[in-house]
Amino acid sequence: MDRGQPAGGAVAGLGPTRHWRSLLLRRSGGILLSLFVAALCARPALASCGAAADACELSSGDYHIATPDPGASASTEATGTPAVVFLHGYGGSGAGVLRNRALVKELQERGYALIAPTALPRWNGKRSWNFLPGAEGRDEAQFLQQVLGDAESRFGIDRQRVVLAGFSAGAFMVNYLACAHPGDFAAFAPVAGGFWRPRPEACAGPVRLLHTHGWADKVVPLEGRILGSSTREQDDIFAGLALWRQVNGCADDAPDRLWATGQKLHRRWDCQPGGDIELTLGPGGHRIPDTWPARVVEWFERTPD
């Protein structure tokens, strides 16, 4: 043994006890660093138009986006990236949508980008969508087309494979845009939102639409409700579905298929090519079901019977 090297490989100038303490600290620090790096890698990758937290600024508003990892979708390189445009609820924001990590992660793993636009503030400072026909304010259809054009040029989004989805007030916006501009998106997927009364007498079409709702929803009940002390009234969800069947030219009100998955009940109407409707009812209240991100992709990619 080299007399100048302390026993056990201790560093010169340190006693054995101090040497082992130093070695342990270095090793534990390396483990912590590895865990930190792994945690960063596990986080969903969020794209932006500037610094990490920056929104993509447009002339009429902004949006946030989370893009999938390269190779997550086998068809991405050839045709571009499919996407779900998700409209937040009353008082929310695009940045808030991207904080829903389960939503972001599931879509990314399936090769989809998540695009989250932000509504403009209302008179009370709360953000919401300008969905009522004839109302003054931003033209939301035009704004969302601007969002898609920008996302296509910046991030390679395939505009032929984009689902417009939304929650609560965002879902009301989805229904009105599907009614007036069905060709702007490949499909529509409202969660916990329909029409206001009086509902539109007619809509353009056909449409592909997946409606998801909680059986116990008290904010947007299935039967509709008057909002507070105002004269504004949410419409009956089933009446809205009847309108969609009319738009799609369904031969019968009875669904083509009925089934259940666990506590969820499903109904589907395959009325014509490019015109299918699906209803999913769950036991919960006013929320986005945990299984919704996977379900919307499976539904969108399904070839109608």
Image: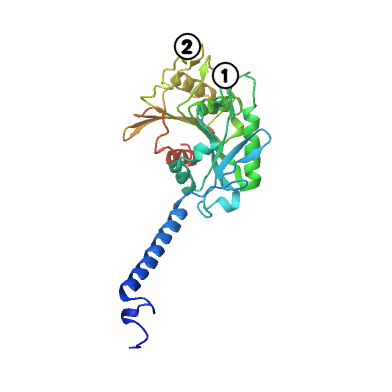
- How far is mark 2 from mark 1, CA to CA? 28 Å
**Residue at the spot of label 1:** 202
- Residue at the image position 46 percent from the left and 49 percent from the top: 109
What type is the residue that disc 1 sits on? Ala
* Residue 59 locus on image (x, y percent): 69, 35
What type is the residue that disc 2 sits on? Ser
Q: Left of 227 or right of it: where is 76?
A: right
* Residue 103 locus on image (x, y percent): 45, 41
Mark 2 Cα shell of 10 Å, populated few (<14), some (14-19), many (≥20): few
Question: Is residue 71 in view?
Answer: yes
Mark 1 Cα shell of 10 Å, populated few (<14), some (14-19), many (≥20): few
In which quadrant is the N terminus drawn? bottom left
What element does badge 2 sit on?
loop
Q: Left of 229 or right of it: where is 176?
A: right
* Res 7 quadrant in image: bottom left
* Res 36 quadrant in image: bottom left
Q: Are marks 2 and 1 in contact (CB under 8 Å)?
A: no
Instruction: State the mark number for residue 229.
Output: 2
Instruction: State the mark number for residue 77.
Output: none
Q: Is residue 164 above or below residue 110?
A: above
Residue 53 or 13: which is nearer the viewer?
Answer: 13
